[in-house]
Each structure stands twice: as structure tokens, then as C-alpha cells.
Image (cartoon, rainbow, N blue to C red):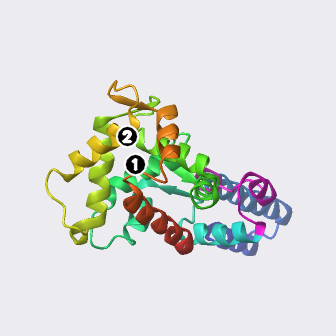
Amino acid sequence: MGAVMGTFSSLQTKQRRPSKDIAWWYYQYHRDKIEDELEMTMVCHRPEGLEQLEAQTNFTKRELQVLYRGFKNECPSGVVNEETFKQIYAQFFPHGDASMYAHYLFHAFDTTQTGSVKFEDFVTALSILLRGTVHEKLRWTFNLYDINKDGYINKEEMMDIVKAIYDMMGKYTYPVLKEDTPRQHVDVFFQKMDKNKDGIVTLDEFLESCQEVSFFDFASEDDNIMRSLQLFQNVM
């Protein structure tokens, strides 16, 4: 705006060189416009075509439009960082501390490990968790529990996840938890999942064990998490 006003003043006082003044104004205007566009390119992300996302997910084009509108409302830059993700997710667990579980969830959404989640990442994960097949959901869940992404779930990782879930549920968890409840939960998990008793759970063991039973002992907690993701979808 200052550049435009300055040019306007210049046009009033330098009548002998109108063509040069107009050319200078045109250059300044478009230089500023290009700089603004370059700055926006650095901080904003526009998603792939909705038709492509519709083909890649289980959402309709209309649903994707609604989701994108909400995503942009919460995240004007077109991407969400971990801190914002935690703040949004915490809304659904007011009686607990969801920060650690949201941390693990964010890194499961952030498949490229860039430190930010794009709209494409967001809807791809939601599509699997809310409308994917049982097999797709289990593979995604395994990836969530495999914190260090080495292809296995060990007891330390499972303990971290269990503690994060209980922290998220908060003091109103029923029945009231005992101090050793997380460890007992992890022990039961490994008794069922660790087929060859080598202290780690592979993806094949995880899939096989989950398909042998109707669901595993995480059912109640995972059900709460799935409901929170549905709410997460609604708020976005």
C-alpha cells in the first residue's frame, strides 16, 4: 500500500515522466504480488485433486469437500503441526491428558516424517480407521504401536502406548486402575500376540492373533479412540 501511495504522489509531482512512473508502479505492484505468492507457497499447502483423493479413499467428493473446509478452518496453512494436533485432540478427553497418545497418533498420520500432516495424510488415515477393512485397520494399528518403526512391537513400546491410553482416559476410567494395571495389560497382550515367545510381536503375529479372536483386550480403549476419531472428523 505504501508503494502504491508513493507512486501516486510521484505521478502528481513528476508529470514529465508519466510512462516511467507507470512502468515503475507496474513493476513494484507485480513484484510485491509475486513475493506475496512465493511467501504463501512456502507456508500453504494445497491438496491433490479431490477426484484423486476420492479414488484413493473411502470418502465421496462431497465428504472430502466438507472435510477440507473444516481442515482449512482449523489449519489455514493447509498443514497441521503436532502442537495444533494435540490441542484439537485434547478436546475429546477433557478429564485426562491426551498429549502423549496424540504424539504417537500424529506420527502415525505423518507417514513421511516431515513434522506436519497434510490434508491428504489426514483423510487417508481417517479413511482407513473409519471405513477401512479389518485388515487395513489392523495394519494401521500395528504401525501406530510400532513406535520406532523397526517392524516389531516390543514390551517397552507397548507399555508406552498403554500408559498413554490410560493417561488419556483420565481419573474417570472405570474400573479404577491399579498401579500395576498397565504392566498386566502388556503381559496379556504378549501372551496372546507373541506366538514364538521371542519378546517381540511381528506384523504377521499381530494379524494372526487379532483374527483368531473377535478382538483383543484393548477393545474398550480402542473403541474410545475410534469414537474420538469420529469426533475428530466432525470437528474438522
- Specify the amino acid type for callout 2: Lys
Q: Please tell me which residue is depicted at 44% across the width and 28% down the height of the picture.
A: 150
Residue 232 left/right relative to 131: left
Mark sitting on residue 181: none
Element carrying mark 1: helix
Residue 133 image offset from top left, x and y in percent = 64, 52
Q: Please tell me which residue is depicted at 53% across the width and 45% down the height of the picture.
A: 211
* Residue holding disc 1: 104
Callout in the foreground (1, 2): 2
Residue 58 left/right relative to 208: right
Above/below status of 231 relative to 119: below
Relative depth, front residue between 46 and 66? 66
Element carrying mark 2: helix
* Residue holding disc 2: 192
What's the magenta region? 40-61
- Specify the amino acid type for callout 1: Tyr
Q: Please tell me which residue is depicted at 33% across the width and 42% down the height of the picture.
A: 158
Q: Quadrant of the N terminus?
A: bottom right
Alpha-carbon distance for marks 1 and 2?
Answer: 23 Å
